Amino acid sequence: MKVVVAPERSFASGTRRVVSVGGRSIGVFHVGDRFYAVRNRCPHQGGPLCLGRVHQPAESRTPGDPQLRELPPMIACPWHGWEYDLETGQSFMGGSAPGVRSYDVQLVPGPYLAETFDVFVEDDYVVLETS
């Protein structure tokens, strides 16, 4: 099923729209020159995922030298901070808590997967495709 979300010219980069499709709430995001779509339900505890903060992942090879990574953006659930890759829906971490010591870490897939959808521009309209 294809659903027209909005005319492309009215969907500015850095914005999002939440639409209802077949009883599912789906967030459509325009980040940079790409569109992403994920279900508006955090797999962790059902929070309104699409109301969360969207950010570009960063890493630092040395203290005080953070660099943005060339990866798809992440979204953090507003309830507990669980983060998901906007392109694949894969989780990588849970909520954050203040720490007292830092350790070397690597990014590994988490236990949850947010539902993602194809979204594209067709005839100057942003279109969401669900199955």
Image (spheres, grey):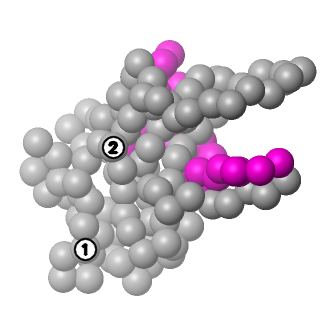
- Which numbered disc covers residue 131? none
Q: Residue at x 45, y 56 (%)?
A: 72
What is the magenta range?
A: 38-63
Q: Secondary structure at mark 1?
A: strand
Question: How far apart, in angstroms, are the residues tagged by discs 1 and 2?
Answer: 19 Å
Picture layout, residue 16 above or below residue 94: below
| 121 with respect to 59 (left or right) | left
Picture layout, residue 125 above or below residue 59: below
Density class for disc 1 (Cα within 10 Å; few <14, some 14-19, many ≥20) is some
Q: Residue at x 45, y 65 (%)?
A: 30
Q: Closest to the observer: 16 or 36? A: 36
> Residue 82's x, y, as percent?
57, 28
The amino acid type found where label 2 is placed reads: Thr
Q: Which residue is mark 2?
A: 88
> Residue 67's x, y, as percent?
68, 60
- Which numbered disc covers residue 121? 1
Contact check, label 1 and label 2, Cβ < 8 Å: no
Foreground tag (1 vs 2): 2
Residue 113 sits in quarter: top left
Q: Residue at x 18, y 54 (%)?
A: 129
| 103 with respect to 12 (left or right) | right
